[in-house]
Amino acid sequence: MTLAVGDRDTARVDGWGWTMGDAGSGFWIGREALTAVMRAHDHRGPGPRDHPHRRRPRSLA
């Protein structure tokens, strides 16, 4: 389950378990990562390092 808490409102997303969709859970994150890796291995899409939403490391200097 993903929970967003603001000053006045709260929003809940999913939380129905892995079979019905559980966006934001550890299982979901792991499954998405493995899907990206296998797609790249099969040449069906960008790898996890090439994904447009990947965060770039920040320089500490």
Image: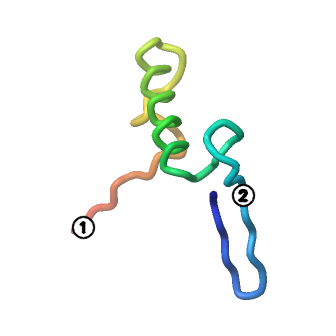
Residue 31 lies, with reference to residue 15, above or below; the image says above
Residue 36: x and y in percent read 49, 29
For the residue labelled by badge 2, is the local secondary structure a helix, a strand or a loop? strand
- Per the image, the residue denoted by label 2 is 13
Quadrant in the picture for residue 59: bottom left
Using residue 28 as the reference point, say whether residue 50 is left or right of it: left
Q: Earlier in the sequence, mark 2 or mark 1?
A: 2
User: What residue is disc 1 on?
Assistant: 60
Mark in front: 2 vs 1: 2
**Which quadrant of the figure contains the C terminus?**
bottom left
Report the amino acid beneath label 1: Leu
Q: Residue furthest top?
A: 42
Residue 13: horizontal and vertical position, in percent?
A: 72, 58
Please tell me which residue is depicted at 41% across the width and 16% down the height of the picture: 41
Q: Is mark 1 on a helix, strand or loop?
A: loop
User: Which residue is drawn at the image coordinates 44% and 52% (left, top)?
Assistant: 55
Give me the residue at 63% from left, 57% from top: 1
Label 2 is placed on what type of residue?
Answer: Val
Q: Distance between the residues labelled 2 and 1?
A: 35 Å
Residue at the far bottom in the pictured view: 7
**10 Å neighbourhood of mark 2: few (<14), some, or many (≥20)?**
few
Instruction: Check contact, mark 2 vs mark 1: CB within 8 A.
Output: no
Task: Give the label on residue 10, or none.
Answer: none
On the image, the x and y values in percent for residue 19 come to 66, 36
Name the image quarter holding residue 12.
bottom right
Residue nearer the viewer, 25 or 42: 25
Q: Say which of 53 and 23 sits in front.
A: 23
Residue nearest the observer in this picture, 37 or 52: 37
